[in-house]
């Protein structure tokens, strides 16, 4: 699927439905703990299913180094990276609202995904750079809330839109 809008709509619908089904039970510690990993992987797994591709081929952006590897048919040491940590900016707000009995609407979830659901394919070496800068699971302190490239700019990792290349 090459249509980002359609992907976001389908992801939002799936996430909305699962949160509404689970909303009443998320306040039970054992259930919340048990579901944590599943909810963490939920959107990524649905995205892969919808797109019918293994995750390295469903990225929105690819680093120059990762692209060189792919062009050599080398898929080793490549990382499927959420450009904006989904746990902080998508998952946590949705789960906290569900636990409070105020589930996000389908429209609100779609807006979150439109704003924050971007995937980059980078090398393990580049992932280590993000880790060393303590940007693996958070945005830079001065982040404006809009620039999806902020972590990569801090790490001096150049990203290319996959719309313009064939990987």
Image (tube, helix red, strand yellow):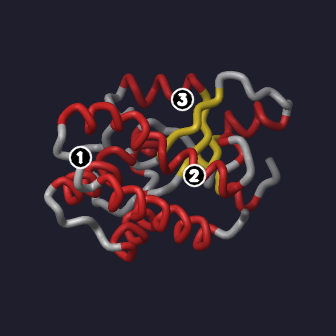
| Mark before the other along the chain sequence, 1 or 2 | 1
Q: Residue at x 44, y 63 (%)?
A: 113
Percent across and percent down for residue 158 are 57, 44
Task: State the residue in front, 115 or 67.
Answer: 115
Q: How many marks?
A: 3
| Mark before the other along the chain sequence, 1 or 3 | 1
Residue at the farthest right position:
72
Say if mark 1 contacts mark 3, CB within 8 Å.
no
Dot 1: element:
loop
The residue labelled by disc 3 is 126
Percent across and percent down for residue 151 are 40, 43
Q: Measure the alpha-carbon separation of dots 1 and 3.
A: 36 Å
Q: Measure the alpha-carbon separation of dots 1 and 2.
A: 21 Å
On screen, residue 99 versus residue 67, left or right, reads left
The residue labelled by disc 2 is 46
State which quadrant residue 6 falls in: bottom right
The residue labelled by disc 1 is 26
Q: Measure the alpha-carbon separation of dots 2 and 3.
A: 26 Å
Residue at the farthest bottom position:
107
């Amino acid at each position: 699927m090459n249509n980002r809008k359609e992907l976001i709509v389908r992801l939002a619908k799936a996430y909305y439905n699962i949160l509404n089904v689970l909303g009443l039970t998320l306040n039970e510690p054992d259930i919340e703990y048990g579901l944590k990993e599943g909810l963490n992987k939920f959107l990524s797994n649905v995205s892969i299913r919808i797109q019918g591709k293994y995750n390295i081929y469903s990225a929105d952006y690819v680093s120059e180094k990762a692209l060189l590897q792919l062009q050599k048919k080398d898929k080793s040491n490549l990382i499927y990276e959420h450009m904006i940590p989904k746990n902080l900016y998508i998952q946590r707000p949705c789960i906290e609202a569900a636990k409070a009995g105020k589930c996000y609407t389908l429209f609100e979830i779609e807006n979150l995904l439109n704003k924050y659901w971007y995937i980059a394919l980078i090398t393990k070496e580049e992932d280590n750079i993000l880790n060393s800068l303590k940007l693996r699971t958070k945005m830079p302190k001065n982040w404006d809330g809009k620039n999806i490239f902020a972590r990569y700019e801090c790490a001096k990792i150049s990203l290319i839109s996959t719309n313009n290349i064939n990987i």
